[in-house]
Amino acid sequence: MKKFMIFLFLGITTLSYAQTADEAMIRKIYDEALEKGESYEMLRQLTKNIGGRLSGSPEAAAAVEWSRQTMIDYGFDNVFLQEVMVPHWVRGKKEIARIVNSKKLGTQSVNVVALGNSVGTGPKGAVGKIIEVQDFQELASLGREKIEGKIVFFNRPLDAKLMDTFRAYGGASNQRGSGPSEASKYGAIGVVVRSLSSFLDDVPHTGSTNYQPNTTPIPAVAISTNDADLLSGLMKDDENLDFYFETHSEMLADVLSYNVVGEITGSEFPDEIIVVGGHLDSWDIGEGAHDDGAGCVQSIEILRIMKAMGYKPKRTIRAVMFMNEENGLRGGRKYADLAKSNNEKHIAAMESDRGGFLPIGFGMSGTKAQLEKFMDWKSLFAPFGIYQFKNGGGGGDIRALGTQGVPTIGFIPDSQRYFKYHHTGIDTFEQVNQRELEMGAAAMAAVIYLIDKYGL
Amino acid sequence: MKKFMIFLFLGITTLSYAQTADEAMIRKIYDEALEKGESYEMLRQLTKNIGGRLSGSPEAAAAVEWSRQTMIDYGFDNVFLQEVMVPHWVRGKKEIARIVNSKKLGTQSVNVVALGNSVGTGPKGAVGKIIEVQDFQELASLGREKIEGKIVFFNRPLDAKLMDTFRAYGGASNQRGSGPSEASKYGAIGVVVRSLSSFLDDVPHTGSTNYQPNTTPIPAVAISTNDADLLSGLMKDDENLDFYFETHSEMLADVLSYNVVGEITGSEFPDEIIVVGGHLDSWDIGEGAHDDGAGCVQSIEILRIMKAMGYKPKRTIRAVMFMNEENGLRGGRKYADLAKSNNEKHIAAMESDRGGFLPIGFGMSGTKAQLEKFMDWKSLFAPFGIYQFKNGGGGGDIRALGTQGVPTIGFIPDSQRYFKYHHTGIDTFEQVNQRELEMGAAAMAAVIYLIDKYGL
């Protein structure tokens, strides 16, 4: 009994000591991020000096060079590029759209943007009667008879009642992703999609659409939520109302681009790799500040914090700027392919692709044992307002690693504001708050530190 | 034993039923706020149609009339005004400030605003050598010999390491509140205070200073954090550097103004009053959107939600727009005085005066029994991301009620962004996010509902 008590005592002491050491370390990580953080200045450079960075664009190439050079300047142990061929979609001349022949308003311009990957109408535009539907079921029930030759207007809003706005987004996003293909099956000549926004305003939201192989690609635009409501209202009892839109987008030949990787080599287990990343490409119409400049600079900042603190990781920590998340996911897939063919051992992958907002938690997909370990860390984050450690998490760029069995972790910031800026012209540096961005970097650095120390 | 089991069973059933009914009610409150909320439109009217509303100004009078009319239009049972005499400080012509005779820059304009309640320099301005101090201790150690005839520059920043930015603010705010009086004791001719901001930028933050009765009032301005750093840097090894500033502010005679009160009369206990409020006055240089238009419209929205849901409170629920929180607290004190002289029974008072940001919790000051009751409600709010129910809370406007023994509750939104906008020209409608504002109103309405149902 006495022996047991002593063991128990030692056990508790060791546990308390480790807990206290981890608390102190995490506190130091936050102090470095909040007092001497450089993520915000990095984001300023990426968004203001480079701007929107669609795959295949000169800006995307500039962003590759900028992030490579930034990580070299920080003195990371290895900085290298991974070649990846990416789609090269161009928007071309600014889109035009008008409600025509409205009983009430006559001709009325509305705010639209072409969907990513979509074919253009060219200078002749597309014009026709509008037919409004809420979902694919309603589309099917109308059938070819009612749809052929018309422009289909998908107008299902995000569900405002859902606290997690990503769930609301998920519940509406098939209209954009598959709407044009679905409408094309019934002979539609074009598609207008209500912007995937949580707010009523005049800002249209782009994002990629995917043409299914056996359908005729038809032009497609997203319309601002205010204009979607306007259009829906004007259409009622107005048989003469037409819609006109003009887009000049086209898909060009694939272009050579790169994932950018920077790493600090592990001191004990250099072959065990922990990845943290964001995607370097963004839509062209804004500055890609929240989506996903934030995730990129936070990933670099995590390694910078470790170096600045003199922390030497046992395992190799990699910051990865993935290319082409927005309209192809080629970079994420290429990274996983190379990891496999090079026999690299990835012990965890984390992604930040939900904006540079207030951190509230992390989600992880992994084995039961990994999840238990991960959940045990939750209490360490309570002093920092982080209260969600949940089962299930990752991100588009690390999904392919996940299917190889690597545990994936998604960084979760507060989601309330994200779908105001997502894929818009107002996703700019000014919309990112410095402290929120820094707290996100600190939270992620703390989790990476724990994985490095204890494995996963 | 059997009897006990039955009691236990009934007890659990009743408890579960109540819990489930409350869960359903709170869910309905959130749905109403998020799907049909009107707080954002109210805020647009208050900030865009009226704007900044300093006590005694025509805008403050317009805001009184606007909120009175708004609550009448919503059909609240009683809407009335409470007379209160308020200070009438005016800023006058825009402030000017320059660093003069700098070795490196010669003459350099900097961004300042006069502190609220401060005396002006008049057209002659104030000019002199600058002496930088971090706190009152340092000021005292320098003494009259070093300070007399000079301009004192209080340059202690907010502590970036603190997660709760209100604590950081509290740790720096005596420079603004008492700095001018303290400096005056040693013969200073003016004061420059580093803006109480969590961020480095060019935006100066105003706020009130309080001259102690036995000191000579001296002019005082707040300087932007960027310019504070510039000034501090340029002063080093530069004996010739002077500082010039010009303010045209003055304190006029007190003016008659009003608290605005709207109420829904209780169906069972009409004499038991639950108050929820914000302050209607704001600083003049912005639109007073976060501070505290948000709290005002949320308070009105809570009563609107109850009416829209057909909820008939047992107790009387009051929305109060307090006047003159910013530079006098006269409205809050008057409200408490009237409550006492009218023998009103207030069972709880809640205030929202920390901006229209993401709700994360509530703090309450009350008896042990009241606190236990309050803490029991915490789990009901977990689905909505609210995780902080803590001991201690209130607000400036309900402090006087608190000293009468009324339990006071402070609404706690996330604090990371607040001290970017607080008391500035950029505290505008555009900086308030609709969903965050609505979620705050819903969270407060839910707590008010629980107090109404169960008492406190």
Image (tube, coloured by chain):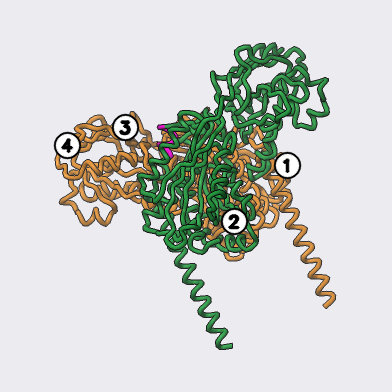
Chain colours: A orange, B green
Prevailing secondary structure class for the magenta stretch in the rendered image: helix
Q: Where does the image place residue A52, in percent across and percent down from the top left?
A: 46, 33
| SS of the residue under disc 4 | loop
Task: Report the residue marked by disc 1.
Answer: A309
Q: Distance between the residues labelled 3 and 2?
A: 50 Å
- Local secondary structure at mark 1: loop
Is tag 3's residue or tag 1's residue first in the polypeptide sequence?
Answer: 3
The x and y percentages for residue A5 are 81, 73
Q: Is mark 3 on a helix, strand or loop?
A: loop
Image spot of residue B212 (x, y percent)? 70, 30
Residue at 62%, 56% in the rendered image = B366
Residues indicated by labels 2 and 1 sit on the same polypeptide chain: no
Q: Is residue B48 magenta?
A: yes
Residue type at tag 3? Glu
Instruction: Determine if marks 3 and 4 fall on one subunit.
Output: yes
Magenta residue span: B43-49
Amino acid type, residue under disc 1 in the picture: Met
Q: Mark 3 points at which residue?
A: A95
Point out the image quarter for the C terminus of chain B.
bottom right
- Quadrant placement of the N terminus of chain B: bottom right
Report in which chain the residue with disc 4 lies.
Answer: A
**Mark whose residue sits in front, 4 or 1:** 4
Q: Which chain carries label 3?
A: A
Label 2, label 1: how many angstroms apart (C-alpha)? 35 Å
Q: Distance between the residues labelled 3 and 4?
A: 24 Å
